[in-house]
Amino acid sequence: RNGWVDVEDGRVVAVGADGETPTRIVRGECAILPGLVNAHTHLEFSGLDRPIASPDGTFAGWVGAVVAHRQGRGSATCGDMTADIVRGAHELVSGGSGYVGDIVTTDSYPELPVRGTAFHEVLGLGRQDVATRLRDAELRLNRPTTAATTWGLSPHAPYSCTLNSGRR
């Protein structure tokens, strides 16, 4: 009560009690919170003008539209995806996020202005894909961490995986 908080460049640098003289103070009714966590993002879509819509209003139609969008980008536009990821990260920071969990589908991942974990998405329907998916997952997990980014895996939803049971 009747204390003050000195903030410099978005960081608390000092606190004090009534009667002390701060150099700058946070005034008015406000709350000082730690950075928020956005635990599940797809920053690669940050450059879209609007969300991807389903052409027929169904979930399956929406999934098809997302896959078509990703395939349409191709490797030639990887730089655009990198710019979209950075753009989305800046939007998170401006909204108060201090940590992000980003689901990643590209091997080209930029340094972000926010700390977080980049989760490589593991996606595949066929049993024949298992060895390839495991090898890719191991390679991706062994990527070096950076000052801002650690690496993880994000298995996709059950509807995009095969059953491992031998029963029919």
Image: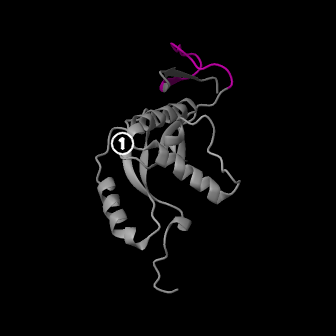
Q: Of residues 4 and 94, which is closer to you in this image?
A: 94
Q: In this view, does 113 lie above or below 145?
A: above
Q: Is the magenta stretch mostly helix, strand or loop?
A: loop
Residue in the image at 36% along x and 42% along y? 108
Residue in the image at 44% along x and 70% along y? 126
Counting from the top left corner in percent of width and height, residue 58 is at 69, 57
Residue in the image at 53% along x and 43% along y? 37
Give neighbour class at mark 1: few <14, some 14-19, many 20+ (Cα, 10 Å): few
How many marks on residues?
A: 1
What colour scheme has been applied to the protein in the rendered image?
Answer: one colour
* Image quadrant occupied by the N terminus: top right
Q: Of residues 147 and 78, which is closer to you in this image?
A: 78
Q: Can residue 2 be seen by looking at this rendering?
A: yes
Instruction: List the single residue furthest toward the bottom.
Output: 167
Give yes or no for residue 23 being in the magenta stretch. Answer: yes
Q: In this view, does 154 lie above or below 33?
A: below
Secondary element at tag 1: loop
The residue range painted magenta reads 12-29
For the residue marked with disc 1, what is the amino acid?
Ser
Counting from the top left corner in percent of width and height, residue 158 is at 54, 67
Residue hosting label 1: 108
